[in-house]
Image (cartoon, grey):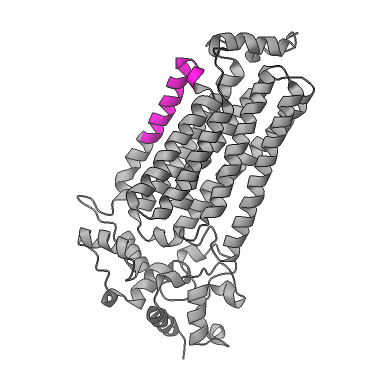
Amino acid sequence: MSENTEHNAHHGDGHDDGHHVNYFKIYATLVVLFLISVAGPELGIRWVTLITAFGIAVVKANLVINNFMHLKWEKRLMKWMLATSVILMFLMVAGISPDVLNHEGRNWENVATREWIAAQMGDDHGEGEETMLAEGEVEAEPAGFSAASSFGTVCATCHGAGGAGDGPAGAALDPRPASFVDPAFWEGRDRDRIITVIRDGAASVGGSALMAPWGALYTEEQLEQMADYVMSFRPE
Amino acid sequence: MAHARPIATTRSATGIPTARLAVWWILASEVVIFGGLLGAYIMHRIGHPEWAEAASHTQTWIGAVNTFVLLTSSFTAVLAHQAAERGNGKEAAKFLGFTIMGALMFLVIKSYEWAGEIMAGYTITANTFWSFYYTAAGLHALHVIAGAIIMGVVAFDAFRGRELHRVEIIGIYWHFVDVVWIFLFPLLYIAK
């Protein structure tokens, strides 16, 4: 019982025991806000999505923190302690943001990221293309597609620039990435199968799930070009 | 009597009960952990328009159901606190039990969701979006698991009328886990 008394005594100074939150009302409000945050983005209007998804998240978090966690009734010291933490977190993010958000600065350009994005975006993703064209740096037209350059950004990390399965990210994989210069690899494999694996992932033909499906990146025609490029590694 | 208790659990220089101060300290450090992770995610998401394609594969309705489950479990956690304040340990234990069930339901739904995604080839190494997806939601899920275990211990004691002040402490932690998900849900599932 002593804990209880102690608890109540503490409550006297930390909390004002006179606060009677109607928890059910808070909960009902949270549920309604939650429903709006799911329904709002369905409209597909950008600013409505931002407000309903993120604006409401802030309101919901606020309701929970103040009423369920009782921060409203905590001493000012506690609020400052938390505020310090939040401010430091924002400082950290703000400090990193110029490097991550931008792909170029006064004296530098992140060529690899630029090329990666260009290769990933292909030709028919309207919104992103607009952003990139606005920057005037990357051409994202169909004519700009090159299987060799896409292989360099998408595949080479694991399969290696020369297709020998020796890319830097592949070293740690088990099974190791396929080597396209190995004659044994080509036994029983044809162009159609290469296309299928690039599009649907190796798991689709009973291979390793580590070879992810990349179909979303390419049109059917580009898939064929990618397969032809992979075939070009095949030893005679 | 409090004769056998270590001094640190009973004294309070700030006037705030030590346990409550301690849990808020933990949460202050969690703010930086989750804040840093989510901040990095948001920056990458804005800097990489091609992520929209990967993000479109997350299943909104599963995320939505889990949001509802966590909100509800937060509600039962605060009801447990209310019961503990009235000195009703059995009632507090019952509501903590509901909260634990919410945690389990959340984890079952998450496992179902992840199993489907992993089998479809969307693994943690598929690309950077999925790396963030599994890291952020995975770190959160670890918090859910830890919270459920601690809540079990607290409920066990509360049922016997012991250490009732702990009900509030674990509740504060649990609400924080809920708050993190409140932000994860729109970030991973809605902003497509």
Residue B121's x, y, as percent?
Answer: 55, 66
Does the image show residue A18? yes
B181 shown above or below A234: above
Residue A70 located within the stretch drawn in magenta: no
State the extent of the magenta-drawn residues as a range.
A72-90
Report whether A91 appears left or right of A25: left
Query: Which residue: 46% across, 44% down?
Result: A36
Q: Position of residue A198 (x, y in %)?
A: 48, 75
Residue name at image x 62 percent, y 59 percent: B115
Quarter in which the N terminus of chain A is drawn: top right
Q: Name the main secondary structure of what is drawn in magenta.
A: helix
Up/down of A174 relative to A148, above or below: above
* Quarter location, residue A112: bottom left
Residue at (58% x, 9% y) in the render? A12
Residue B77: % across, % down = 64, 30
Q: Is residue A87 magenta?
A: yes
Residue at 53% from the left image edge and 62% from the top image edge? B122
Q: Seen in the image, is A51 located left or right of residue B190?
A: left
Q: Is residue A100 visible?
A: no
Horizontal side, residue A174 vs residue B184: left or right = right
